[in-house]
Image: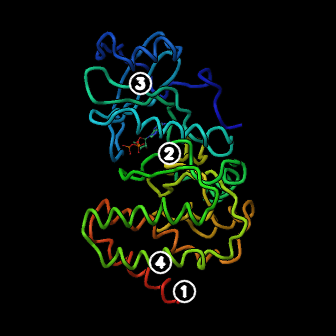
Amino acid sequence: QRRPPRFSALRFSHPPSQPLRIMADGDPIRKWILEEGGASRITRISSVGGGCINTANRYETDVGSFFVKTNRNIGPEMFEAEAAGLDAMFSTDTIRVPKPWKVGSIPRTRGSYIIMEYIEIGSSRGSQAELGRQLGEMHKTGNTDQGFGFHMDNTIGSTPQHNPWTADWVTFFRDHRLGFQLKLIKEQYGDNDLYAKGQRLLEKLPLLLQGLDNVQPCLLHGDLWSGNVVADSHGSPVILDPACYYGHSEAEFGMSWCAGFGPTFYDAYFKVMPKQPGFEQRTELYKLYHYLNHYNLFGSGYRSSCTNIIDSYLAVAC
Ligand code: ADP
């Protein structure tokens, strides 16, 4: 009900300026916008700040705007995974997500691009209650009978995230989430102590997750922190830049230490996805995946958070 029809409802927010001649003929972005995107003129290209990894631009045209990210050094796999995640979330028709249109390689470079729906981002943070409710709806609606995983590997930050379809949640979370990050820490930093502790935790995982006999795979955004949550110009929540997979719904809150979710958010979420017994006992376990990833990405400043969480679970699971 919030989502604009394909192009017709898109409007310029600024009067179009003089047509630009920046893009060379044969440029695949320009070509797609003009041939398949329904535009006959690109009137302005402006850069959009705030990203961590890629260059972002807004392409204004006579049929509205397109949001384009490019990366000069990474092939299309990263954007293909982003598009697959956006598409999966978009298909649930629950929370606003930009519709991905096209991913491709940039000729004569190692780079790639993604073209997606441009969303006019508003100045407010949006309603926490709406965000909670709509995220709950996405978890409730986004199901699969293929198990835990995703049809594509993706990245969490820039760390690879493997998503092979796995029948059982404990195995998936043990091998492809915690186990993978621990192995990377050992390889990158030679941190054998943390690795050894981590292995003991992995052995205890069935015990720590034992209350969860019937976990349903839910479509998760996968990297839900405040930098990936905005509101559109109507104040409706929008989630961006996902690392999607089907997993236990509670794993979505693994980044909650950077998300600023308050009681209003959780109340609204639990009205849709009722809180499962033992929720509080599992929250740190799900955060651990992201703390381990932060250790891998940003170094030993995150080591003590990882150790503290592992120690606390080892203490209760002896
Ligand atoms: P990166 O992949 O480099 O992290 P982001 O996906 O975070 O880049 O996008 C960069 C900025 O562009 C974000 O801060 C966000 O506000 C804005 N943005 C992202 N997607 C859209 C979109 N579809 N429409 C409009 N603005 C967007």
| Callouts 2 and 3 close, C-beta under 8 Å | no
CB of mark 1 within 8 Å of CB of mark 4? yes
Disc 4 residue crowd, few under 14, some 14–19, many 20+, Cα 10 Å: many
Q: Name the mark on residue 317.
A: 1
For the point 70% across and 59% down, the residue is 216
**Residue on which disc 3 sits:** 59
Residue at left offset 32%, top offset 74%: 303
* Position above or below: 192 against 87: below
Q: Is residue 281 above or below residue 125?
A: below
Q: Return the residue nearer the eye: 97 or 153.
A: 153
Residue at the spot x=59%, y=22% of the render? 7
* x and y percentages locating residue 109 in the rendered image: 25, 25
Residue 301 placement: quadrant: bottom left
Residue 199 is situated, as x and y percent measured from the top left of the image, at 43, 75
Q: Which amino acid does label 3 sit on?
A: Tyr
Nearer to the camera, 18 or 193 = 193
Q: Mark 4 points at which residue?
A: 201
